[in-house]
Amino acid sequence: MNIYDVIKSDKFYVLDTETTGLGHTAEICQIAVIDSSGGVLMNTLVKPVNPMGYGAMDVHGITDEMVAGAPTWDAVSYVLEAIISGQNVIIYNAVFDRKMMEQSSEQAYLPKVEWKNIAKFHCAMLAFAEIYGDWNKFLQSYRWQKLATAAKYYNIPVSDAHHALIDCLTTLAVCKAMAKGK
């Protein structure tokens, strides 16, 4: 089932994360999951093992103090697995967020979870890149566009970007707009 069939089925979840950085030790510090009608299934800060990166704090505004009392990835991932098990999950940049889910487990010394075996992931960013149509001759693929670019393309107002729940709702709106054109 392609992403457009999933969106048109109206039976999917949208997931987004905010992280402590972008590198190989980065972890999730906030995660949200909504259903296809915008209902919130998960929306929580996550206490990472390592301190927040300064660049990441500048992007999303989440500080070490804010996550100090939050649940750890161990507790969150257990609940997340139960929520998304067997579901179609749409993410704007699915490879990155799934990688962060795996890295968060690694940093917490948790057993590896094969997220691809738990849920079916679909990338809204790749679908939008094709619609946007900015071809990269060297890479022979469409250039990835930011979620804010996709929202602007469809005249979707964005406030408080880089907040997991807001980004989920923005991704949902972009997905529904993309599906109308297909």
Image: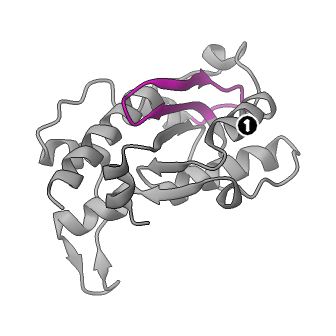
Magenta range: 29-53
State the count of labels: 1
Q: Residues within 10 Å of mark 1 (few under 14, many from 20)?
A: many
Judged left or right of residue 125, residue 109 is right
| x and y, in percent, of residue 115 in the image | 68, 55
Where residue 161 sits, quadrant-wise, is: top left
Q: Residue at x 54, y 26 (%)?
A: 41
Q: Is residue 58 above or below residue 45?
A: below
Q: Is residue 4 above or below residue 104?
A: below
Where residue 42 sits, quadrant-wise, is: top right
Please identify the residue farthest to the front as the structure is shown: 9
Judged left or right of residue 3, residue 81 is right
Residue carrying label 1: 77
Q: Residue at x 45, y 49 (%)?
A: 91
| x and y, in percent, of residue 68 in the image | 71, 16
Asked if residue 58 shows in the view, the reply is no
Q: Is residue 96 above or below residue 38?
A: below
Q: Residue at x 80, y 50 (%)?
A: 106
Judged left or right of residue 62, residue 115 is right
- Where disc 1 sits, the SS reads helix
